[in-house]
């Protein structure tokens, strides 16, 4: 039985992925068009991308957003206290 459609859904937009649009990375399915950094919308290479909870980032933005998350949560807590 060969079936050209797929029941896979894109991890990024949660819509059905058709075979022509399918990009599978580490067993996770994306639309080709959805395989881009959610921060800068830059196209990603399969060899260099990062993901967090199914959200894709380019390496620079992943590091910027998550490696510095110590600062982020500090700021967050500070603003909470002052509110
Ligand atoms: Zn998609
Ligand atoms: Zn980016």
Image (spheres, rainbow, N blue to C red):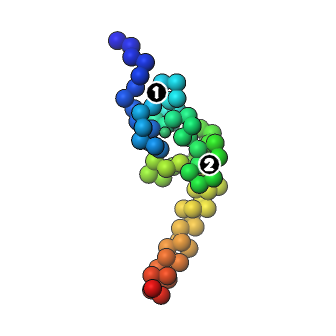
Q: Is ligand 2 closer than 8 angstroms to the Cβ of mark 2?
A: yes
What residue is shown with label 2? 41
Mark 1 packing: few (<14 Cα in 10 Å), some, or many (20+)? some
Q: Picture coordinates of residue 5 (x, y %)?
A: 41, 22
Q: Picture coordinates of residue 66 (x, y %)?
A: 54, 62
Q: Specify the quadrant that holds the N terminus.
A: top left
Residue 71 drawn above or below residue 59: below
Q: Foreground residue, 72 or 19?
A: 19
Q: Foreground residue, 66 or 6?
A: 6
Q: Is residue 79 left or right of residue 6?
A: right
Q: Picture coordinates of residue 57 (x, y %)?
A: 57, 50
Q: Is residue 14 left or right of residue 71?
A: left
**Picture quadrant of residue 39:** bottom right
Residue 76 drawn above or below residue 66: below
Choose the circle earlier in sequence order: 1 or 2: 1
Q: Picture coordinates of residue 56 (x, y %)?
A: 53, 48
What residue is shown with label 1? 18
Residue 33 in view of the camera: yes
Residue ID at (51%, 35%): 31
Secondary structure of the residue carrying tag 1 is loop
Q: Residue furthest top?
A: 1
**Picture quadrant of residue 64:** bottom right
How many angstroms separate mark 1 from mark 2 (CA)? 22 Å
Secondary structure of the residue carrying tag 2 is loop
């Amino acid at each position: 039985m060969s079936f050209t459609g797929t029941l896979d859904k894109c991890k990024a937009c949660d819509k059905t992925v058709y075979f022509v649009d399918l990009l599978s990375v580490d067993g996770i399915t994306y639309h080709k068009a959805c395989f881009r950094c959610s921060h800068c919308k830059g196209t990603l290479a399969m060899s260099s991308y990062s993901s967090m909870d199914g959200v894709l980032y380019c390496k620079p933005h992943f590091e910027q957003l998550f490696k510095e998350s110590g600062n982020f949560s500090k700021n967050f807590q500070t603003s909470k206290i002052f509110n």
